[in-house]
Structure formats: C-alpha cells, structure tokens
Amino acid sequence: DADVTQTPRNRITKTGKRIMLECSQTKGHDRMYWYRQDPGLGLRLIYYSFDVKDINKGEISDGYSVSRQAQAKFSLSLESAIPNQTALYFCATSDSLASFGDTQYFGPGTRLTVL
Amino acid sequence: GDSVTQMEGPVTLSEEAFLTINCTYTATGYPSLFWYVQYPGEGLQLLLKATKADDKGSNKGFEATYRKETTSFHLEKGSVQVSDSAVYFCALSDPPSDKLIFGTGTRLQVFP
C-alpha cells in the first residue's frame, strides 16, 4: 500500500464549485505540504503544516484553504474554483525528527480541471 | 529569495548516451539539494540528495555533486536507458521550514 495517498485522483468541476482534495499518510510524519504543478512552472507551495495546530501559507495560497484534521490527514479546499486553478496537485510529507528531515515524500497527485 | 534554475527541455538522447542536466541555485543559507524524478502519470520520487558542500549524491547510476563555489548541482548519468525517460526536478530545501523550492523541471526522452 502507498504511504501517501490522495483522493480523488482526477476531478472535473465547474467554475464556482467548492472542491476538497484529501491527503492521507501512513508514514507517521509530522509535516505535510500541498503543491500545485503547472507546465513550465515546476511545483509551487500552497500551504504547509508542521503539526495539527501549525498551518502556514506558502507561495500561492490565495483562493485555497486547508485543514489538518489529524496528524495523518491534510485536506486542501478550493472554496470557489476558477479555471486558472486547473493543475496537478501534490501532497507531500516529511519527518522533522529524521536525521535529514528535509526529504519529502510525495503522493501520486490529483489532476483537477475547472471548466 | 532562494531560487533554482535548471536547463529547459526536452533533452532527447539515444540509449547509452551520456546525460547532463544543469542546475544552479541561489540561497542565503546552507540548503540541502535534491533531484526528484517524475515518471509519466506518477508523483515525484526522490532520486538523490546532498546536504553539504562537496557531497556527492548517487542512486540508480545517477550522480550529482554539491558545488558551493559554482552554486551548482548538475545531474549526470554515464549511460541512459529508455526507462530513464521522465521529468527531472532540481530542488533546494529552505531551513528551518524544510520547504522545497523547485526548478521548472527538465523532460528527458531516451530512444532505443
């Protein structure tokens, strides 16, 4: 079984709809991250969380919100989706207590299309 | 702020050719440096990393050396295979948050 899972894997929605992307991990890591990938732009950080009570904005947080329901779960919401939020979204985790805690482990991604 | 610049692709090679993908970085502190690989339809996987100057990361025949004097972390492989076709991302970590800052990615296509 995968250590970092994302649901759904693919989603097509319409402008103005509320969307939630979910991420779960079984690695026991304390830190979780949400990125979006756009062609030619690499990955950009949306939000990150050091633990359940510590959530921080990343580079491109406008239009997004997150919830850390438990150490193992980190959800990303688009309150009112717009077409330029069409992208591939990745969740990642890392372990701050590891010898080199900056290594991140990625989920398989969610492809979101906003029409 | 910190940033990563990597060569644009696609890089197209024949099987068994030598590969170099250039990566340079700008950082105010002492970041760790990474290469991640994304195979078609999959998420990113850590390929190799280096945590301090002159360290060499290596994995699956790929190598990269952390060069502080040239702020570079170029990826090399002596003999590529068709199965190496993927998108390769150079990245640095930004302590103490461990946020990763990525380059734009380089697509490698290897033909038989």
Image (tube, coloured by chain):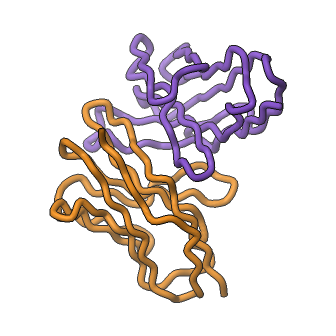
Chain colours: A purple, B orange
Q: Nearer the viewer, residue B1 or A27?
A: B1
The residue lying furthest to the top in this view is: A53
Residue A42: x and y in percent read: 52, 48
Question: Image quarter for residue A86?
Answer: top right
Foreground: A86 or B79?
A: A86
Residue A56 x/y as whole percent: 41, 19
Q: Is residue B28 above or below residue A39?
A: above
Is B102 placed left or right of B86 in the picture?
left
Looking at the image, how many numbered discs can be counted on the residues? 0
Q: Quadrant of residue A52?
A: top left
Q: In the picture, which quadrant includes the N terminus of chain B? A: top left
Looking at the image, residue A20 sits to the left or right of residue A67; the answer is: right
Q: Residue A57: x percent and y percent? A: 44, 21
- Asked which quadrant contains residue A13, the reply is top right
Image quarter (top left, top right, bottom left or bottom right) of the C terminus of chain B: bottom right
Identity of the residue drawn at 37% across and 62% down = B23
Residue positioned 75% across, 31% down in the render:
A83
A53 lies above or below A75: above
Residue A80 position (above or below residue B91): above
Above/below status of B16 relative to A113: below
What residue is drawn where x is 30% and y is 54%?
A: B25
Q: Residue A76 location, x and y as percent?
A: 61, 22
Q: Nearer the viewer, residue B40 or A18?
A: A18
